[in-house]
Amino acid sequence: MRPMKPLRLALLLVGSLPPAGALGAEASAHAVADPHLPGQERLQLTYEEALELAAMAPTVQAALVASRAAREIGDRSTGLGNPELVVSPGVRQGPEGGLAAEVTLVQPIPLSRLGSSRRAASRAESDALALEAASLSLGLRLEAATGFCALWGATQALERAKDEVSYVQELLARFEEGQAAGAFTSSEVAEARTHLAETRLLQVGLEGEVHDVGLELSRLLQLERPTALLARGALPSADLPTEEELRRRLALVERLPEAAMASMQAVAARSRVRELEAEVAPWLGVGASYKQDGPRDKAWYGVLSFSLPIFDRGQREKSVLLAASREAEGAKEAARSAARALAAMFEHEVKHTAEALAVFEEELLPSAQEAARLVETSFNVGESTIIDLLRARRNLAQVLARVQYARADAAAARARLSLLLDAIPSEEGPK
């Protein structure tokens, strides 16, 4: 029986990982009371804390442990086979009958570079696992950045909705007093009540969105106890390089962990083929044999044996490994193409969200605020109706909410591109 591959043993060791909560990654988060579930708490996270939790996710830690175990075990691999001990007991016939025995001990020695081939394959496999951990970490941090910004945007939109509810409640109280004095009609007051109900429904909907987005972020971060997270602090303000530096770094995008992992998996696949070729090469057996046919009939022999791969040259196993190697080469090219497409998409998102945010902040929001101010001023002097005022307030509330989402989208786009650029190593990756 062949010994267990170091990579397989390393993967078995992953089962000893502590749960996510035991890693202490949630220690920096702040707990606050859940406004909807008395007695329950929700965690508040900053952007930096979300990224820290993503880097400590169980899947990332498992890949790191597997990589270290594979390297540690694989570096002890040798090319020697296991010694073979053969004991041949017997019985002598004739006048001097009795017991006889022959003991043979043989040490198989490969006539190839099996030891170095095994260690090279093990190192490639452990390097691929380390790159897998880096790829998982980057993917989770990208999702955490997106999730945190989405949660921040929904939270800010909810705050704007709460402010609008308070404003409309005060407005309705004024209208009801004016109705009692005969200044407003019943239909106008009813219109104000309708607007208040709509604003409250918006608030309830946003509360549900904040809960769901927070719970989804908790799931992405693989927390031990899923909870609806809350965003704390400001949006990330990622500093992006100049256009020239951006072009230079994006030219190296094929070195991202995902693409580098695929390249290293292709290297590992080729290494396993070479390892098999070394295993089925000729073997030399060196040993000794002791033989005793009688009380005084004893002899020692040297043993030399050769194992020649004439019929079984590992064709079946080699065909499987070669097929896997070809597939790994194809996956490598696909990963490189995906990395280029991802970089192009992230770069476009930064420009697109910045343009959209500029329209919101420089045109739409000032116009909506000015329209609401003018309508309120004209209403106070009796030149506009309640309907006009409520319509202007409704438009402003919608714009305020959309501005928060636009800010979150722009910040998320910059954060994703920044994380992507930081993950591109400067040194040469595997070919």
Image: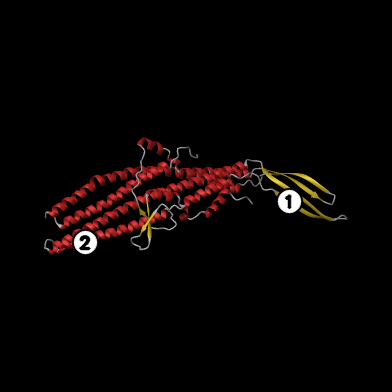
Where residue 29 appears, as percent x and y from the top left, is 40, 53
Question: 25 or 412, which is in the foreground?
Answer: 25
> Tag on residue 368?
none
Question: 301 or 215, which is in the foreground?
Answer: 215
> Tag on residue 194?
2
- Foreground tag (1 vs 2): 2
- Secondary element at image label 2: helix
- As measured in the structure, the alpha-carbon distance from the residue carrying label 1 to the one carrying label 2 is 95 Å
Q: Is 395 left or right of 242, judged from the image as shown?
A: left
Where residue 284 appears, as percent x and y from the top left, is 69, 43
Q: Residue furthest top?
A: 244
> Tag on residue 86?
1
Where residue 136 appears, as percent x and y from the top left, is 45, 48
Say which residue appears at 35% left-offset and 36% top-offset.
243
- Secondary element at image label 1: strand
Q: Is 371 left or right of 111, judged from the image as shown?
A: left
Q: Residues within 10 Å of mark 1 (few under 14, many from 20)?
A: few
Tell me if I can see residue 254 in this picture: yes
Q: Residues within 10 Å of mark 2 (few under 14, many from 20)?
A: few
- Say what amino acid the circle numbered 2 marks: Thr
Question: 220 or 256, which is in the foreground?
Answer: 220
